[in-house]
Image (cartoon, coloured by chain):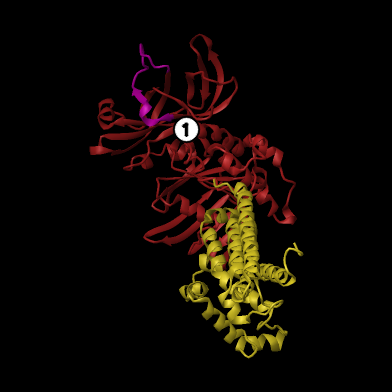
């Protein structure tokens, strides 16, 4: 078995805050997900070498960067990681071109490959900026140059610390597709820090949930986002089901697209989708209604048959809410109902139901 | 220009330029080092070092000159050591004038460089580190270029101070034409003899011209560098 992409177990006290995080990830894009102040940035700084752990280890694809037991703590410049910060941190005295090639210049000769400048320029759409200085760039352009600069340093791992947090919605939309291409086309694993569930659902293959300096859960994105026990906790973001889907056809008359997913067929607004396109869709737990009989004469287009596979504890204010898992042709679907509805329908594990999906969001355009 | 000035006056101008340039260039490496220490260092006695550097700024120049005479004179502890081991002599030589000027200009230079180092965003240096640059390279390709405006300002201030230095120089190395008689000393000498007014005025005008030229040069350089380092 190959070594995990990330193998981390670190401990570090920062004032009153204790970072004590351990997880392994095999994913191409591992999201460190958590609220502000949960320790995500401290954790990524430990990986990047900007914060020194008191004890523990950090291994990237089998290579040891930190192992306090063996007295190994590599300084940042010898870790060969690409770090994209929240603010772009471009060098103001250098041109975009010089910024991009900054890290390439410091790659040890023995492993240095010819700079793939053209590939990176094309990937990020920044070839028209080469001669400019950082002061003359927009926020989105700066961030794309920063990503290119990190890539050209030939990193073994790309660290991205909330790279979109400082940008407005339009700029985020401008950069997200580039990060997706990065994940799918470049053979560099990524650690992506975010407090935005939308970004995580769209980008991550693996999610590590960070909570008060510890890893509360770690696993494949769809599994973590739909976990009942995580969603039932106070303050937790709403659970959702992430499905992979393929566009199989269109309903031209009504401007709709037909999708096939492991859970069944779905119909959504066509938008800019193309036939045969693969995408990720997300269904929020609160956007699903249950019916014991096949619904008739309703406006709902998307109805998925399944059986109840798990019923969670009562949660929320006054224990009014219950999370359930359905098994829809082998695909898990998470549903949030009121405890009263669960009692009224007399739901129990194994009971066949029909899930009426009120809304489907497309995470990959 | 040589038939416009008398040979003695011309010598004083040339000597002043040499002394000021030497003082400026010689204080640059230690000035940069001390500025770095004061801006970034955390060590015991930092405020003491800070005070020592600023001392020439607040002491009467004659006192500084006298201390230099005591320390760096032929029989002074440091002067004797330098002569015995390296054959360097400061007292009553132009090198002594350069030393006096350097000491007087040093606090101005350190201050300007220190402020510009403190203004650098250290996150940029951390970013350079993650891109594979070791600390020495980070200093050379990030820190140094970013504090260049401060370095230029410090050098010009030091040069200007050296051009005008009088008290410490005359106390330490006296007023010997052709060896230690810089522009201010020459002007002073002219004012002490009957009929020296025209000579004094000529040298005064030259002094003004050099100062204005230095200021102008620093403006041009600062603008050139500033355009490169447009703040993000």
Q: Which residue is label 1 attached to? A: A169
For this orientation, the residue located farthest to the right is B3
In terms of depth relative to the viewer, which is nearer, A296 or A174?
Answer: A174
Count numbered badges in the picture: 1
Q: Position of residue B103 (x, y in %)?
A: 58, 74
Q: Residues within 10 Å of mark 1 (few under 14, many from 20)?
A: few
Compared to residue B209, the image places residue A224 above or below, namely above
Quarter of image, res B181: bottom right
**Chain letter corresponding to the colour red:** A
Q: Position of residue B5 (x, y in %)?
A: 72, 66
Can residue A145 be seen here? The reply is: yes
Q: Is residue B60 left or right of residue A313?
A: right
Compared to residue B42, the image places residue A99 above or below, namely above
In the rendered view of the protein, which quadrant contains the C terminus of chain B?
top right
Compared to residue A51, the image places residue B28 above or below, namely below
Name the chain letter of the residue that bears numbered label 1. Answer: A
* Chain B visual colour: yellow
Magenta stretch bounds: A283-301
For this orientation, the residue located farthest to the bottom is B75
Quarter of image, res A241: top left
Q: Going 70% across and 83% down the picture, which residue do you hit?
A: B88
For this orientation, the residue located farthest to the front is B195
Q: Position of residue A111 (x, y in %)?
A: 72, 53
Question: Is A322 colored magenta in this rendering?
Answer: no
Q: Position of residue A324 (x, y in %)?
A: 36, 33
């Amino acid at each position: 078995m190959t070594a995990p992409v990330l193998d981390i177990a670190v401990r570090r006290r920062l004032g009153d805050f204790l970072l004590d995080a351990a997880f392994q990830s095999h994913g191409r894009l591992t999201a460190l997900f958590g609220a502000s102040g949960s320790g995500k940035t401290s954790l990524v700084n430990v990986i990047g070498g900007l914060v020194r752990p008191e004890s523990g280890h950090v291994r990237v694809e089998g290579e040891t960067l930190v192992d306090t037991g063996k007295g190994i703590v590599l300084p940042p410049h010898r870790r060969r990681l690409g770090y994209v910060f929240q603010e772009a941190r471009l060098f103001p005295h250098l041109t975009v071109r010089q910024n991009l090639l900054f890290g390439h210049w410091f790659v040890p000769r023995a492993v240095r490959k010819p700079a793939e400048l053209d590939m990176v320029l094309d990937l990020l759409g920044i070839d028209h900026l080469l001669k400019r200085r950082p002061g003359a760039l927009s926020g989105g352009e700066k961030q794309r140059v920063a990503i290119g600069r990190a890539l050209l340093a030939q990193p073994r791992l790309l660290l991205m610390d909330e790279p979109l947090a400082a940008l407005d919605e339009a700029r985020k939309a401008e950069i997200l597709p580039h990060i997706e291409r990065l994940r799918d086309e470049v053979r560099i694993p990524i650690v992506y820090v975010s407090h935005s569930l939308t970004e995580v659902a769209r980008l991550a293959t693996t999610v590590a949930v960070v909570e008060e300096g510890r890893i509360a859960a770690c696993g494949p994105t769809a599994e973590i986002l739909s976990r009942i026990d995580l969603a039932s906790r106070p303050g937790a973001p709403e659970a959702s089901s992430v499905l992979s889907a393929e566009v199989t056809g269109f309903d031209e008359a009504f401007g709709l697209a037909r999708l096939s997913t492991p859970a069944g067929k779905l119909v959504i607004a066509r938008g800019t989708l193309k036939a045969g396109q693969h995408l990720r869709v997300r269904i929020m737990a609160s956007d699903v209604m249950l019916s014991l009989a096949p619904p008739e004469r309703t406006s709902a287009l998307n109805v998925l048959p399944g059986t109840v596979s798990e019923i969670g504890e009562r949660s929320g204010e006054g224990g009014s809410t219950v999370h359930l898992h359905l098994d829809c042709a082998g695909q898990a679907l998470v549903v949030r109902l009121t405890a009263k509805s669960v009692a009224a329908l007399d739901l129990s594990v194994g009971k066949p139901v029909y899930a009426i999906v009120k809304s489907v969001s497309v995470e990959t355009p | 220009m040589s038939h416009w000035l008398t040979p003695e006056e011309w010598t004083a101008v040339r000597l002043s330029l040499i002394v000021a340039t030497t003082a400026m260039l010689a204080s640059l490496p230690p000035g940069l080092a001390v500025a770095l220490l004061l801006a970034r260092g955390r060590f015991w006695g930092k405020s003491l070092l800070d005070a020592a550097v600023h001392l020439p700024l607040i002491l009467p120049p004659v006192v500084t000159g006298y201390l230099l005479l005591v320390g760096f004179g032929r029989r002074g502890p440091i002067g004797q050591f330098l002569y015995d081991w390296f054959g360097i002599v400061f007292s009553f030589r132009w090198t002594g004038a350069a030393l006096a000027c350097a000491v007087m200009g040093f606090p101005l230079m350190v201050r300007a460089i220190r402020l510009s180092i403190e203004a650098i965003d250290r996150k940029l240096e951390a970013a350079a580190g993650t891109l594979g640059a070791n600390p020495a390279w980070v200093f050379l390709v990030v820190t140094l270029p970013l504090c260049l405006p401060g370095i230029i300002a410090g050098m010009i201030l030091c040069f200007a101070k050296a051009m005008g230095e009088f008290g410490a120089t005359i106390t330490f190395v006296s007023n010997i034409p052709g060896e230690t008689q810089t522009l201010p000393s020459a002007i002073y000498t002219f004012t002490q003899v009957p009929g020296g007014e025209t000579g004094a005025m000529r040298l005064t005008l030259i002094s003004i011209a050099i100062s204005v030229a230095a200021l102008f040069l620093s403006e041009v350089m600062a603008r050139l560098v500033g355009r490169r380092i447009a703040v993000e």
